[in-house]
């Protein structure tokens, strides 16, 4: 998949061609909805939107991002399209979608993402900043000649733990990250993560993960650089893809422990800790946020 944010550089171009069909989509739609969502008949002059052009056969020809008035002003100040930077509140690396665009001024004092685009409109880097303006990590996108991506890197600038960032994919047993280290995500055509490799700043492989998906579950296996199996875990999902149980195993496939999640109406969730014998040894209720 690819994320296009094509920049309208020249004014006064025609809105349509004899062999083309033009449709306008609001930016509150996700990128995938450009193909599947219902187009708008018109938008306000100061409203950012996507402009999709189709061949008579119905095949997508181009997708352009038409900025709002404030965005247009910022773009004129940029000397080189290759250095264009845009700001967003949300970033979905699985679908490679940037959502809820904001101004640089609005980004101050709030967690946000900063995307750097090349002159073709492809996102090259996505930086994540905390509310103090400190950059925590950067997504480095990798595109082929056709503008498709099968992997991307996340570079970290401080000590982290991948299991804290995504406890479904990663386990505490093997998920340490140091400053300068990089996690390389390998994805398929549907945007599903098939594996992750973790390198140090010198591109030395430290450990890697492999993922297998079922209808209502995920199996994660993790290895050291020499392919020694460290362990695995299975995640079961319930309604709305909410995780209901994590079961952890050692390198021999023997259960170590498990965590069970329940989602009652009168609480946010109930978390149960289970030992290797299948016995509940701790139970916590997380109240709903007011």
Image: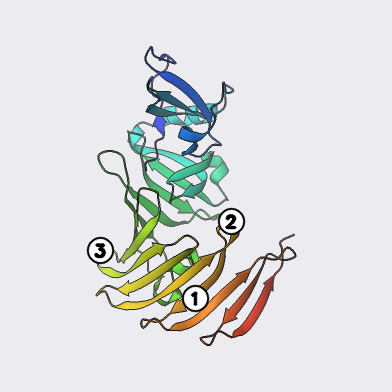
**Image vertical order of residue 160 relative to residue 138, above or below:** below
Q: Tell me residue 14's x, y (percent).
A: 42, 13
Q: In which quarter of the image is residue 57?
A: top left
* Dot 2 or dot 3, earlier in sequence: 3
Instruction: Write the residue at 39% across / 61% down.
Output: 156
Q: Tell me residue 17's x, y (percent).
A: 39, 14
In the picture, which quadrant includes the N terminus? Answer: top left
* Dot 3 or dot 1, earlier in sequence: 3
In the picture, which quadrant includes the C terminus? Answer: bottom right
Choose mark 3 or mark 1, whichever is in front.
Answer: 1
Choose mark 2 or mark 3, whichever is in front.
Answer: 2
Residue 247: numbered disc = 1
Q: How crowded is mark 1: few (under 14 residues within 10 Å), some or many (20 or more)?
A: some
Q: Residues within 10 Å of mark 3 (few under 14, many from 20)?
A: few
Q: Extreme bottom residue here?
A: 277
Horizontally, residue 71 falls left or right of residue 221, namely right
Residue tagged 2 = 240
Label 1 – label 2 distance at C-alpha? 20 Å
Badge 3 element: loop
Residue tagged 3 = 203
* Dot 1 or dot 2, earlier in sequence: 2
Q: Extreme top residue here?
A: 18
Badge 1 element: strand
Residue 270: numbered disc = none
Examine the rendering and report whether any part of residue 177 can be seen: no
């Amino acid at each position: 998949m690819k994320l296009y944010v094509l920049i309208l550089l020249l004014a006064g171009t025609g809105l349509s061609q004899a062999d083309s069909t033009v449709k306008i989509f609001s930016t509150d739609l996700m990128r995938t909805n450009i193909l599947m969502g219902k187009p708008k008949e018109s938008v306000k002059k100061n409203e950012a939107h996507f402009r999709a052009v189709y061949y008579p056969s119905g095949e997508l020809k181009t997708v352009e991002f038409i900025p709002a008035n404030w965005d247009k002003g910022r773009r004129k100040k940029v000397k080189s399209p290759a250095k264009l930077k845009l700001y967003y509140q949300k970033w979905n690396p699985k679908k490679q979608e940037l959502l809820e665009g904001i101004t640089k001024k609005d980004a101050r004092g709030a967690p946000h993402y900063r995307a750097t685009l090349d002159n073709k409109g492809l996102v090259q880097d996505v930086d994540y900043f905390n509310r103090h303006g400190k950059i925590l990590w950067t997504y480095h996108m990798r595109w082929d000649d056709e503008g498709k991506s099968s992997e991307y890197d996340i570079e970290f600038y401080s000590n982290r733990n991948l299991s804290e960032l995504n406890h479904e994919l990663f386990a505490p047993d093997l998920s340490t990250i140091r400053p300068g280290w990089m996690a390389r995500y390998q994805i398929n055509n549907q945007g599903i993560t098939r594996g992750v490799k973790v390198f140090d700043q010198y591109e030395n492989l430290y450990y890697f993960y492999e993922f297998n998906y079922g209808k209502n579950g995920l199996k994660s296996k993790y290895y050291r650089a020499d392919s020694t199996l460290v362990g695995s875990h299975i995640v079961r999902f319930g309604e709305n893809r909410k995780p209901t149980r994590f079961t952890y195993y050692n390198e021999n496939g023997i259960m170590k422990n498990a965590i069970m999640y329940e989602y009652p109406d009168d609480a946010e969730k109930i978390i149960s800790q289970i030992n290797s014998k299948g016995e509940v040894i701790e139970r916590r209720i997380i109240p709903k946020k007011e």
